[in-house]
Amino acid sequence: MDTIASCDAVMLSPSLWKTELAKNVVSSGNHISDFLTRHKSIKTIGVTGTNGKTTTVYMLKEILENSGKKVLVGGNAGGGFNGYCDVILEAENGDYDIILIEVCDMTLNYCNYCFDFDLVGLTNIGNDHMDIHRSIENYKNKILDFSKNKTIFLDKNLKYFSEFEEEFPDLSNILSYDEYLGDLKVFGKFNRLNAGLAASIATYLGVNDEVIFNTLNNFKAIEGRLKIFKLNDSEIFIGKTDNSDAVKSLLDEKYFYAAFVGTPRINEEHRFDILNTVAYSSPEVIVLFPGLDDTVDHGLYRLNSIGFDGRVEVANSLDEIIGFIAEYSHEDAIFIGGNGQEKIIEIQERLKALSDICD
């Protein structure tokens, strides 16, 4: 503690924001966002919500860069803790027109202190991190509090739209968006909504329509997010889908013969709801594999407790996962998701090699 107190500037992890240490650092004026402040003079856009934040940020980044802007990306999209710290350091030395911050739903207060947001885009409000929020209602209220005194873009069909209107004295600060209607290379209504948000913000910033359309129509899925591979007779949909709402948005659009699910950490009980969502879609087989933690036994217990009567398999290694994929690759479609982005990326890389060979 003495060493920390003797520093000229301290960068706090977002997870420490409510601690006594954080209060002491902030009261002393030694937090790095108080010490280095150039980032606060640059137009800053925050993108928050349960799902779609990273994709929306990178869609918007490409649009803005194609319009001639120099863009700095930070927050979760820039790499967790480092993503928040590095954007402050880089802004101090670089010459940027716009900063894009991916604001995790658990770092809302932290980001509100560190950054001066000119605009906020909300993707959606869904079932994730309920071990922290305790309820959707609590999470919604945190978003409302974070959004005050800012211009915010909301999905026009958002369940809580009217509550935002009630909380905003100036309704001109609430702007709505809808699904993007152009041709996207990425799959799904959820990505059309991500694109709609990115397009709405870009239009508000004065970007030419042609730049927006050309960028979005050529946008490709970023690493770890939903990609589609073709192997033998099957389309394989694979990407980070680490909560039940993210999974449901995909399963509502397509039936999958087999669903591969990476398991969550042992304390993230709400993320086992993914298995409920997958089971209710009635795949022929569910394959569990260790995701963020090896909680496969917990996953098996959940499937048994909800009475899933399909085939259940366990893949304990990457080779076993690939083996099961090959076994089911003569069916119409396979889903691979759940928790554990690093594992998802590993599987994507192996599938890319396999599909290249098959091509």
Image (spheres, grey):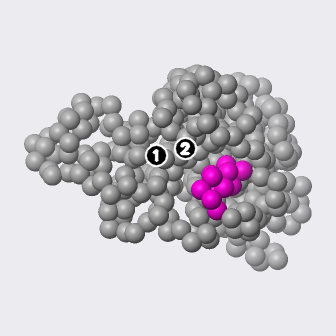
Left or right: 144 as drawn, with respect to 8: right
Numbered circle sitting on residue 120: 2
| Rendered residue at 53%/32% (across/down) | 143
Task: Provide the residue designation for mark 1.
Answer: 117
Say which residue appears at 20% left-offset and 42% top-offset.
29
Q: Is residue 271 visible?
A: no
- Residue 207 location (% of width, % of height): 64, 62
Q: Judge whether 48 appears above or below 216 on screen.
A: above
Does residue 245 appear left or right of residue 65 in this picture? right
Residue 155 lies, in percent from the top left, at 70, 39
Residue at left offset 50%, top offset 68%: 70
Amino acid identity at mark 2: Val
Q: Position of residue 179 (x, y in %)?
A: 77, 47
Asked if marks 2 and 1 touch (Cβ < 8 Å), the reply is: yes
Which image quarter holds the N terminus?
Answer: top left
Q: Residues within 10 Å of mark 2 (few under 14, many from 20)?
A: many
Q: Is residue 82 left or right of residue 158?
A: left
Q: Is residue 56 above or below residue 353?
A: above
Q: Is residue 210 visible?
A: yes
Instruction: Report the magenta residues as a range.
Output: 196-207
The image shows residue 133, relative to residue 15, as above or below, that is above
Q: Which of the 4 quarters of the picture holds residue 353? A: bottom right
Depth order, front residue of 204/182: 204
Q: Assign the C terminus to one quadrant of the image.
A: bottom right
On screen, residue 258 versus residue 247, left or right, reads right
